[in-house]
Image (cartoon, coloured by chain):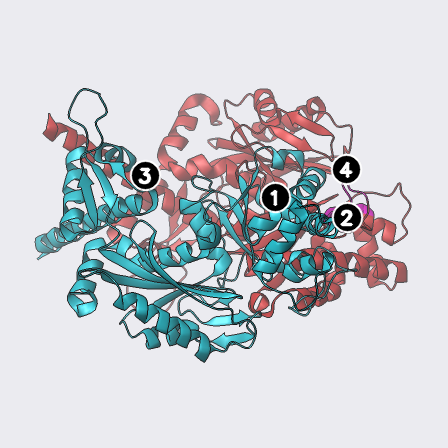
Chain colours: A red, B cyan
Amino acid sequence: MARSRVASADERSRVDGRRRHLGAVLRRVHLGGAISRAELAGAMGVNRSTVMALTAELAAAGLVREERPAPSGRAGRPSLVVRPEPARAYVLAFDIAVDRLVAARVGLGGTVLDRREAPRLRAGADLDTVAGTLARLGRELYGAAAPRSVCVGVGASYCGMIRRGDGMVRFGPDMGWVDQAFGAELGRRLALGLAVSVGNEAHLGALAEHTRGAGVGIQNLVYLHGDVGVGGGIIVGGELLDGDGGYGSEVGHMVVNPYDGRPCGCGSRGCLEAEVGERALLDAARRPPGLIGRDAVRAVVRAADEGDEAAREALRRIGDWLGIGVANLINLFNPGMVIFGGVLRDVYPGAAAPVRGRVAENVLPISRERVRLRISALGDDATLLGAADLAFAPLLADPLATFRDRAAGGHGHG
Amino acid sequence: MARSRVASADERSRVDGRRRHLGAVLRRVHLGGAISRAELAGAMGVNRSTVMALTAELAAAGLVREERPAPSGRAGRPSLVVRPEPARAYVLAFDIAVDRLVAARVGLGGTVLDRREAPRLRAGADLDTVAGTLARLGRELYGAAAPRSVCVGVGASYCGMIRRGDGMVRFGPDMGWVDQAFGAELGRRLALGLAVSVGNEAHLGALAEHTRGAGVGIQNLVYLHGDVGVGGGIIVGGELLDGDGGYGSEVGHMVVNPYDGRPCGCGSRGCLEAEVGERALLDAARRPPGLIGRDAVRAVVRAADEGDEAAREALRRIGDWLGIGVANLINLFNPGMVIFGGVLRDVYPGAAAPVRGRVAENVLPISRERVRLRISALGDDATLLGAADLAFAPLLADPLATFRDRAAGGHGHG
């Protein structure tokens, strides 16, 4: 009895170990792309025959492909290169921003295979409309998938505060949402037998930049995401800072201008997003109140490039407030990098001088010794790719079981 | 050959496992105090005979004591209670604050066994004077230790920015220190054959409150430490936030009053510590410029309690700025608790109303659903106990080897 219990514990631990190894290989090729078996073995600290057995299992399932590398001219038998197979396992990813709705089919490796966009909704877009629109786009993408491809997950990026675990939108001020069961509703309407994982857009943007964008290898980074407001995603020691309830990294409501500040959508004044958000920039550039959206912001940036003095002054003003926020964040987080994403990717270059001025003035010299200020490498797709990675998480945790369950469940295409 | 390599790998993994288990038992009793063997087994997820073997080894070395518990009236043989043995293994801990120098002998379990204080030094105290004074106090404590007790480490808390690894004070503005090799110098003068581990005072205060103070069990917390300025220690997911270089959690230089702020020691204006530090409070209470130190701050707090209107107004003013800082930190970290330590422990009760007002006004409702505002449970000893825990780290990582090495090396007392 004791002996058989020991044996089954050993067997369990062997199976767990194999699952972890398969997940590690698949994660490596999903995030980093093609890699030789020899490099994989080195990175994982296992021998080449172990790696060969693992990649063979993943290749047999159709999740990776093994190829002979281009001739190198070096002696000896070259190590085969392992690549993610984008066409076999894919996810549906959704990006719900204030002025656009995007749906995409994203293959293993982070390749966007197909996408649909719906026009701007803005305030007044209720759960029914948004979930209905997304579900329609999602079903279209699902229907258009290649034969034998399998949908292994669904992820969504939302511009608001999301409850951990169930995708409830606790607070989505830009759409006027409070406690809307978005994840559950979208999952119900898609009817794919998959739960929808939902994350805050700036959190997902930060994770995507950290794993496959400007911040690869940077263990402490601050990602600022400009939409109508300013969201934040902060990576601390390689992990997303999301606090006790999942609502951390909320940089937009850091008060930077307490006694003379612009009113903020949250009911307070002088929050960072009130001073540097879309409306602040458009007002400072004296654009008419009806003009909104990221295209309007980009038009101001272009006008500044072309010499429009009001636009230049607007970028300087926004840059000064943004600089105070960035300086505070560098003092707090001692990060290796600050990344400007969303529309801040467009705004930052014209506002860089005042931002850098504030960093020089307000950050302790030792804390700014190594920090770099960069724009997002993934651009508008950062949040979408972050949502895709949420959806890939179960596959990466247990590749073969997850894939076979979905393929066997009739959720493949042929 | 292959077989013997496997056997030795198994043996290594068995020895590692045992060392980890011994460390886990010792850490548990060091931080949590007396615990029954049965509870220990449950907490560690091992069976009672494993725990019995581990505690027997630690008891044989003299690191813990096992005792019969008080009669409970319940049936069955009661589980023995394991306690840390404070007299056998101890550390030297130092607290270098702006207006005091403390040295203490701290026993396993965090008991302060003996302590010495030197009078205030303030600005102008150079490395030579400070290290010399501390080494003298440390040697006195060492000489007065009980027979057979063993000094297993030395830790120090310093009011400035410390380089990871070597205890270099990069920036200690209150003493005017820049790049002073404090840890190395103190170690050399103590001449105990032990390296000195140095940490920032607010980081160590945060860790101590997290492991044995007001924040036990709280995985995300913000600790604010009032000295002359305001330091911060932030725990994110159970770990200290120290950023890329070890300089994170620097809350004192968060700009809260950018255009109308008081000048700060860092060269900027309107930093949190310029608005709520010792000088801001004493000025607001119209105390003469020569009056400094935590006793002066405490006198203002007492005066406010006794109805002094200038002192009350000063606490309200400081509370408003402190509240802006606290609100920003709650938005960023979504913590379960904010802890006020150092002199802020005295200041906070009289400033709580404006702090709570700002939190209500400036924190997103969802982020403040669960946060609690508390004063430090460890009081003035939080930083000292944090320094002691730095010094205990090697013993807790490998109890028997560390203890025996030190005992055998002639560093015991007989």
Which amino acid type corresponds to the residue marked 1 in the rendered image?
Pro
Which residue corresponds to mark 4? A267
- Chain for mark 4? A
- C-alpha span from label 4 to label 2: 10 Å
* Residue A364: percent from left, percent from top: 61, 67
Do the residues at discs 4 and 3 belong to one chain?
A: yes
Q: Which mark is residue A343?
A: none
Which amino acid type corresponds to the residue marked 4 in the rendered image?
Gly
From which residue to which does the magenta span run?
A: A263-279
Which residue corresponds to mark 1? B349
**Residue A18 occupies quadrant:** top left
In front: label 4 or label 1? 1
Eyeballing the image, is A275 above or below A140? below
Residue drawn where x is 14% and y is 42% of the image: B53
Q: Which one is in front, B75 or A108?
A: B75
In front: label 1 or label 2? 1
In what quadrant of the picture does the N terminus of chain A appear? top left
Which residue corresponds to mark 2? A270
In front: label 1 or label 3? 1
- Chain for mark 3? A
